[in-house]
Image (spheres, grey):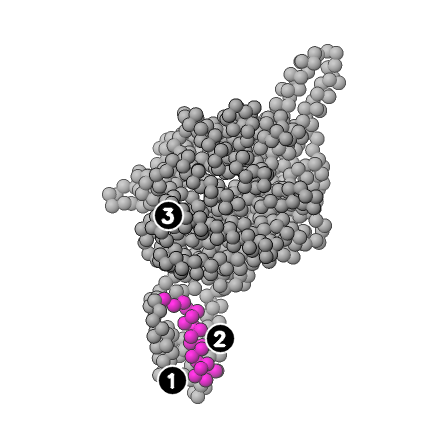
């Protein structure tokens, strides 16, 4: 018999531990209330005779208490309960010490890999991580029910962002940048009025982005279309100034030329301000602001020509890159870029196709932008086109009191994710058992999500004035709670999921790309969606199904399940699970077929999704990439390219970065070994984890697709 410990690990059953625990309690009671040796071993026998393959520590302790009470040993039972409670306190005390000291010594590998955008060696970043470890500790010991903590530790679910749960802050948002620019805002107690020019507007936007990032833990998105108005203001200012200064001296044609040159200069300077400010600012959480710029050339917008100019300049500067400390142009981590494909720019002869061609060049060299199909998005979201919050989390449709759709100024309360492969492992092919466990896990997810929701209830607007009082989300009064924004579907709260491929393989024997497997996978997806729809209806809280919750979670769940259940072919032996509904990286499937297949899953995962396409270096084959972009527009809502484009950020080497014989990434040109200063993309198979020596003593990626 195996004993399931509190952290989910399995241990061999040892009857001596039971005997010792009861004997210690025995020493603290009077002789007539002591349990005899015969009674102690009778309790042990009652546990062993149940014929279970595994039993939890808590169940064993419950049985002991029950048997002592039944035997009339009330004082002994009380002492045992106190002993049990004391041991629990010992286990729970000082749980942060080891992780914090490892962090200070730069030995906490899990923390370093959790967020690639944060440099865990910096003292300022370490302060944020230390606070995060304290938050995790208090969350597990005091803030969450033991049942949820246990499910998290055993890898049944993942309670995201425990390192921020201690504070009344939320996940991600769409900043209401229009309101803040048009009506002004306040930062650090200082009034910032509506800008009079494009360059000042760009400066204000970056200040807002930094302030917003410092008071939330997830990403934010900003629609650059709102800057179009300010570019026109600059144009009108130059036209007025030049006409007043040179009227009668210069022709209208010459004045227009001067205006255009001055405007283009301000355009370049303003966009450069955004790019450099975002990449040089450090927020209070120890990283550059996690921000996405939404690039949508909407012809219904009165400033569409200015918007097109801004989008083009953003792409030009991203294509060029940004200089590192050595003066080498590299790809900046932020801002992320999302480019909207519509009828006017989907490479079918549209007016703005030239900007899309520039976007394709940028994707080939710099990995971004990602692409949203306005056509498919309108099908999925009641005819609306809007940005996700950060990279992936999408809002559900919401109409304000005037019946108008509202997207900006809304947010996500938090995420809890479900480990689907673990359910498949436990069910062992029995579909009835699968759905029974599935429903139990769904119930735990709901309870965990409600913990996230309730933690925000009662939060005062004063905790983050930039969000709640000065326009990023709302303009609430000082001392007012944010509760009305948590209800009525104004904000979302997300149910994530990992491993559709693996759970389908476990339950049907085939991939979800096989017709038989697809039927099962869609049944799982539809049940997830049905659950969130019911929760939403019953509570008035914006529950949603969220695909692609976190790459690191794919490895965490797989690692836990391998430790618990051993190596299972095509499941735990890979070292990772596939993220949400994605096709497994080892399947032979064309980019076009992959996008077509995953499109149906995106429709169900309306609370967040993205599909990736792994392609070779396409810098010299842009036509092929353009065909893929056309395909995205017609077939899938949201997609990203992962191109093979390694380069060293120290010396600018633009070739393949290899792994040396010491298991280190090393630039063959300058011999830089700092992985954080290399752009080593997802390689052939997409595996991002640890490498190992194979039997032939050659370096091999664990996913066994790319051999070095």
Residue 516 marker: 3
Quadrant in which the C terminus appears: top left
Helix, strand or loop under label 3: helix
Q: How many marks overall? A: 3
Helix, strand or loop under label 1: loop
Alpha carbon distance from label 2 to label 3 = 54 Å
> Cβ–Cβ below 8 Å for labels 1 and 2?
no
Helix, strand or loop under label 2: helix
Q: Residue at x 70, y 36 (%)?
A: 182
Q: In front: 591, or 226?
A: 591
Is residue 662 visible to the viewer in this orientation of the structure? no
Read off the residue under disc 2: 82
Q: In front: 532, or 69?
A: 532
Most frequent secondary structure within the magenta stretch: helix
Q: How far across and how far down the image is residue 706, in percent?
A: 32, 39
Q: Residues within 10 Å of mark 2 (few under 14, many from 20)?
A: few
Q: How far across and how far down the image is residue 611, in percent?
A: 46, 40
Q: How far across and how far down the image is residue 562, in percent?
A: 36, 55
Q: Residues within 10 Å of mark 3 (few under 14, many from 20)?
A: some
Q: Which residues are magenta?
A: 54-76
* Image quarter of residue 615: top left
Read off the residue under disc 1: 36
Q: Residue at x 56, y 58 (%)?
A: 451
Left or right of residue 251, residue 19 in this image: left
Q: Residue at x 66, y 29 (%)?
A: 302
Left or right of residue 522, residue 235 in this image: right
Alpha carbon distance from label 1 to label 2 = 20 Å
Question: In the rendered structure, which disc, 1 or 2, sits on the residue that comes first in sequence?
Answer: 1
């Amino acid at each position: 018999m195996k004993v399931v410990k509190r952290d989910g690990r399995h241990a061999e059953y040892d009857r001596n531990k039971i005997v010792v625990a009861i004997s210690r309690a025995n020493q603290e009671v009077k002789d007539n209330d002591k349990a005899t040796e015969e009674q102690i071993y009778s309790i042990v026998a009652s546990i062993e005779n149940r014929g279970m393959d595994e039993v939890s520590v808590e169940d064993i302790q419950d049985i002991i208490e029950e048997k002592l009470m039944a035997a009339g040993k009330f004082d002994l039972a009380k002492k045992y309960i106190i002993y049990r409670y004391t041991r629990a306190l010992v286990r729970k005390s000082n749980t942060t010490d080891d992780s914090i000291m490892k962090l200070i010594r730069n030995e906490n590998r899990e923390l370093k890999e959790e967020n690639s955008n944060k440099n865990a060696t910096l003292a300022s970043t370490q302060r944020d991580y230390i606070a995060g470890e304290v938050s995790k500790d208090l969350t597990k010991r005091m803030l969450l029910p033991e049942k949820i903590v246990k499910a998290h530790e055993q890898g049944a679910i993942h309670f995201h962002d425990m390192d921020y749960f201690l504070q009344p802050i939320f996940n991600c948002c769409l900043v209401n940048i229009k309101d803040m620019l048009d009506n002004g805002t306040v930062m650090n107690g200082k009034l910032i009025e509506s800008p009079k020019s494009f360059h000042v507007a760009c400066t204000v936007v970056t200040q807002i982005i930094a302030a917003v990032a410092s008071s939330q833990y997830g990403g934010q998105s900003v629609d650059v279309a709102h800057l179009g108005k300010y570019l026109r203001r600059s144009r009108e200012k130059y036209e007025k100034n030049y006409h007043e200064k040179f009227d009668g001296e210069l022709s209208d044609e010459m004045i227009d030329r001067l205006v255009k040159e001055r405007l283009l200069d301000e355009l370049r300077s303003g966009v450069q301000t955004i790019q450099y400010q975002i990449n040089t600012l450090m927020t209070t959480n120890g990283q550059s602001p996690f921000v996405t710029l939404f690039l949508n050339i909407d012809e219904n917008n009165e400033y569409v020509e200015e918007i097109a100019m801004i989008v083009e300049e953003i792409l030009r500067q991203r294509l060029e890159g940004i200089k590192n400390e050595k003066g080498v142009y590299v790809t900046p981590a932020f801002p992320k870029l999302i480019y909207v494909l519509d009828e006017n720019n989907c490479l079918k002869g549209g007016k703005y196709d030239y900007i899309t061609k520039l976007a394709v060049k940028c994707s080939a060299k710099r990995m971004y932008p990602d692409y949203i199909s306005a056509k498919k998005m309108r099908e999925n979201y009641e005819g609306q086109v809007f940005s996700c919050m950060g990279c992936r989390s999408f809002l559900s449709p919401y109409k304000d009191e005037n019946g108008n759709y509202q997207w900006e100024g809304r947010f996500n309360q938090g995420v809890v994710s479900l480990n689907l492969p673990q359910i498949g492992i436990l069910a062992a092919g029995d579909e009835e058992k699968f759905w029974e466990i599935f429903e139990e896990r769904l119930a735990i997810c709901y309870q965990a999500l409600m913990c996230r929701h309730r933690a925000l209830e009662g939060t005062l607007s004063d905790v983050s004035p930039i969000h709640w009082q000065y326009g990023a989300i709302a303009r609430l009064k000082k001392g007012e709670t944010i509760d009305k924004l948590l209800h009525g579907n104004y904000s979302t709260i997300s149910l994530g999921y990992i491993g559709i491929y693996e759970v389908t393989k476990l339950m049907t024997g085939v991939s979800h790309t096989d017709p038989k497997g697809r039927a099962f996978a869609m049944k799982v997806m539809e049940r997830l969606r049905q659950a969130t729809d019911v929760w939403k209806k019953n509570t008035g809280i914006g529950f949603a199904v969220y695909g692609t919750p976190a790459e690191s979670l794919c490895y965490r769940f797989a690692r836990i399940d391998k430790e618990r259940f051993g190596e299972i072919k095509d499941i735990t032996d890979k070292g990772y699970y596939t993220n949400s509904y994605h096709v497994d990286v080892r399947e032979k499937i064309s980019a076009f077929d992959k996008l077509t297949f995953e499109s149906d899953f995106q429709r169900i995962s309306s609370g967040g999704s993205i599909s990736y396409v792994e392609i070779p270096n396409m810098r010299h084959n842009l036509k092929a990439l353009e065909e893929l972009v056309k395909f995205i527009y017609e077939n899938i809502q949201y997609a990203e390219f992962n191109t093979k484009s390694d380069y060293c950020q120290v010396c600018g080497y633009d070739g393949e970065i290899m792994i040396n014989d010491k298991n280190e990434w090393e630039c063959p040109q300058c011999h830089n070994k700092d992985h954080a200063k290399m752009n080593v993309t997802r390689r052939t198979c997409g595996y991002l984890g640890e490498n190992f020596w194979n039997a032939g003593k050659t370096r091999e990626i664990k996913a066994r697709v790319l051999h070095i």
